[in-house]
Image (cartoon, rainbow, N blue to C red):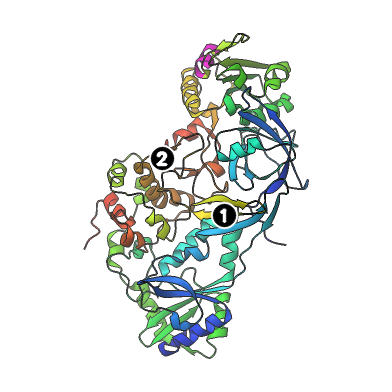
């Protein structure tokens, strides 16, 4: 029996591919491990190292909830070399997956609290894992507000959940905004941080969880501070380039923290104690 | 401690070469490097330290992690190191560097299988430093001495026409039992020689001791020094390639239609695309951030994670950095002391 090798991916078959956006630049890949015995159980916020054999690996957040473990769902925006090749793949194609890696959203500490989700674009992917986890453990959590924005209505991801499933869940609101509307758009037209200030949530008893493009996160954190949220009430996720995912390759450090081991989930209080090099 | 007559050293090396792959210093194009050698004859015995450290025998510059067939056939075949090596002539600074990298590769929740296997397959024969280089060696800054045997399986202490042979591990015992049967005891003379090496002064090391520098650096992320120092950096990366403790790597695939390999290759935090992400964002866009990363990693970040400095004072960056932006200089600058006698 050879010793366990954490750099060795598990083969996984793409069962289904869902185009999330109108342009198709975000797709959700539903994958099953070829060997169903592969030990892979994650918590919301954790990531997987995804291989396209012949291209390489990239760290991708897991967008499915551990309460719905299989197929594993990975929502991927086409940005670079690996994600472009992944987007060219079809159902039946085989990729590699190893992990899960990193810490997770503080699902225990959040119990009994109201949750405010603030997502932008593909940044909803890791939040979706947590949202569905919370909805599947509905009794453990308070009211849920989901603020989500994208550049245009066509760029909103996970539309079935946004429009149907989540608004129908008990004590759950979905508040959508876009940077630019179109003829059919009846919702808000505002940047996410501005929209957040219009919604004006009361920080009392709440945890705010935000993920999106770096510029959106930056201004969202400022808006949350304006609204009176304490640093400990604000949770976000970071991403940096990674090669190993297990704290060896020396790539994803921010000061003495490694995003792959100590992140990707950080509170604003933790971020403020780290050098601003991300 | 055993005793090996200097005149029998080549025969000892021949014996080592006959039982496993012997890797030892050789002189090649005017520089000394570690190379596999077929016998003791080629081994260079007059050297300060090989120009490249020994890390490449545990963490090769390019390493095949596994072979694969791409989708849709998709299969993965593990590749495991299997070559038994005796590494002869490794100095205390490089031995200490391997122990530091053991923390990285073998510590924590994930054990690196490649590093671990190569370490298991290798027997280390250390060699105490008879004459540390006055202008570049600074091991004592980090508590290492010309005689520190940390991490060695066998340590040799040269003493004129003989060498003290200290066995430190079962692996070392097996090696000595096989290659030095009947070697005499060095007795008190052996202990005395060892103590001399442990107490030997390394002047540059005394001058650039980091002291409490690690703690002070907690508050010096925004120090203007980083900008100033980085202005002379050429971004060549030689410091990271020659450094025995630098271990950053990238992972890449090389594939043909019906065969592929996944490689990990040395990388350097000094290269501008090191942290460049697919969307174009780069958290360390200029030399300032990259210079700061290299030195803070070794002098502060690593200390936070592992409790030790990530430098062993081998002096390779001192010798080879084309603009003198080396660890001894930077410690001296940051501490406001002079590195020159």
Furthest toward the left, the residue is B341
Residue in the foreground of this view, choosing between B254 and A105: B254
- In 3D space, how far apart are the residues under numbered discs 1 and 2 (Cα atoms)? 25 Å
Which element carries disc 1, helix, strand or loop? strand
Same subunit: marks 1 and 2 = yes
What main secondary structure does the magenta stretch of the protein show? helix
Give the extent of the magenta segment. A193-199
In x, y percent, where is residue B244? 43, 61
Q: Residues within 10 Å of mark 2 (few under 14, many from 20)?
A: many
Q: Residues within 10 Å of mark 1 (few under 14, many from 20)?
A: many
The chain letter under disc 1 is: B
| Circles 1 and 2: CB atoms closer than 8 Å | no
Furthest toward the right, the residue is A36
Label 1 sits on residue: B263
Q: Is residue A171 at all visible to an observer of this figure?
A: no
A62 over A10 or under it: above or below: above
Identify the mark at residue B284; answer none if there is no mark.
Answer: 2
In x, y percent, where is residue B186? 44, 87
A188 over B55 or under it: above or below: above
């Amino acid at each position: 029996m050879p010793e366990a090798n954490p750099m060795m991916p598990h083969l996984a078959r793409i069962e289904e591919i869902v185009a999330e956006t109108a342009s198709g630049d975000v797709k959700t890949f539903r994958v099953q491990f070829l060997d169903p015995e592969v030990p892979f159980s994650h918590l919301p916020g954790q990531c997987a190292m995804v291989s396209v054999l012949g291209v390489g690996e990239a760290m991708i957040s897991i967008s499915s909830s551990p309460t719905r473990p299989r197929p594993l769902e990975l929502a991927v925006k086409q940005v670079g070399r690996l994600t472009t090749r992944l987007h060219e793949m079809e159902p039946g194609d085989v990729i590699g997956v190893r992990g899960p890696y990193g810490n997770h959203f503080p699902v225990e500490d959040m119990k009994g609290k109201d949750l405010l989700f603030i997502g932008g674009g593909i940044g909803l992917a890791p939040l979706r894992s947590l949202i569905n986890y919370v909805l599947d453990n509905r009794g453990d959590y308070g009211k849920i507000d989901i603020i989500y924005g994208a550049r245009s209505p066509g760029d909103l991801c996970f539309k079935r959940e946004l429009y149907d499933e989540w608004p129908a869940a008990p004590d759950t609101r979905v508040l959508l905004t876009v940077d630019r509307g179109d003829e059919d758009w009846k919702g808000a037209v505002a940047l996410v941080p501005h929209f957040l200030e219009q919604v004006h949530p009361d920080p009392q008893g709440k945890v705010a969880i935000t993920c999106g493009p770096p510029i959106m996160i930056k201004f969202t954190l400022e808006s949350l501070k304006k609204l009176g949220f304490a640093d400990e009430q604000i949770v976000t996720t970071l991403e940096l380039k990674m090669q190993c995912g297990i704290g060896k390759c020396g790539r994803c450090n921010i000061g003495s923290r490694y995003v792959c081991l100590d992140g990707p989930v950080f509170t604003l209080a933790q971020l403020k104690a780290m050098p601003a090099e991300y | 401690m055993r005793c090996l007559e200097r005149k029998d050293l080549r025969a000892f090396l021949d014996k080592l070469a006959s039982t496993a792959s012997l890797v030892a210093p050789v002189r090649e194009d005017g520089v000394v490097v570690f190379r596999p050698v077929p016998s003791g004859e080629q081994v260079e015995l007059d050297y300060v330290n090989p120009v490249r450290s020994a890390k490449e025998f545990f963490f090769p510059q390019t390493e095949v992690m596994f072979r694969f067939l791409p989708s849709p056939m998709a299969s993965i075949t593990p590749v495991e190191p299997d070559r038994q090596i005796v590494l002869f002539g490794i100095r205390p600074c490089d031995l200490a560097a391997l122990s530091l990298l053991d923390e990285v590769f073998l510590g924590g929740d994930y054990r690196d299988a490649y590093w671990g296997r190569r370490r298991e397959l290798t027997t280390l024969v250390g060699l105490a430093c008879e004459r540390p280089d006055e202008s570049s060696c600074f091991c004592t800054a980090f508590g290492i001495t010309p005689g520190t045997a940390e991490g060695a399986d066998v340590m040799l202490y040269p003493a004129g026409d003989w060498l003290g042979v200290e066995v430190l591990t079962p692996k070392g015992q097996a090696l000595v039992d096989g290659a030095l049967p009947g070697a005499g005891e060095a007795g008190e003379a052996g202990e005395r020689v060892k103590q001399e090496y442990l107490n030997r002064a390394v002047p540059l090391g005394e001058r650039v001791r980091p002291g409490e520098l690690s703690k002070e650096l907690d508050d010096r992320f925004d120090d203007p020094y980083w900008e100033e120092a980085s202005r002379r950096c050429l971004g060549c990366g030689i410091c990271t390639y020659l450094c025995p403790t630098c271990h950053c790597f990238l992972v890449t695939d090389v594939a043909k239609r019906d065969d592929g390999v996944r490689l990990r290759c040395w990388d350097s935090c000094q290269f501008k695309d090191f942290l460049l992400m697919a969307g174009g964002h780069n958290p360390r866009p200029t030399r300032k951030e990259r210079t700061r990363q290299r030195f803070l990693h070794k002098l502060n970040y690593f200390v936070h994670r592992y409790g030790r400095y990530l430098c062993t004072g081998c002096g390779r960056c001192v010798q080879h950095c084309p603009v003198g932006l080396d660890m001894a200089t930077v410690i001296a600058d940051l501490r406001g002391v002079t590195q020159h006698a």
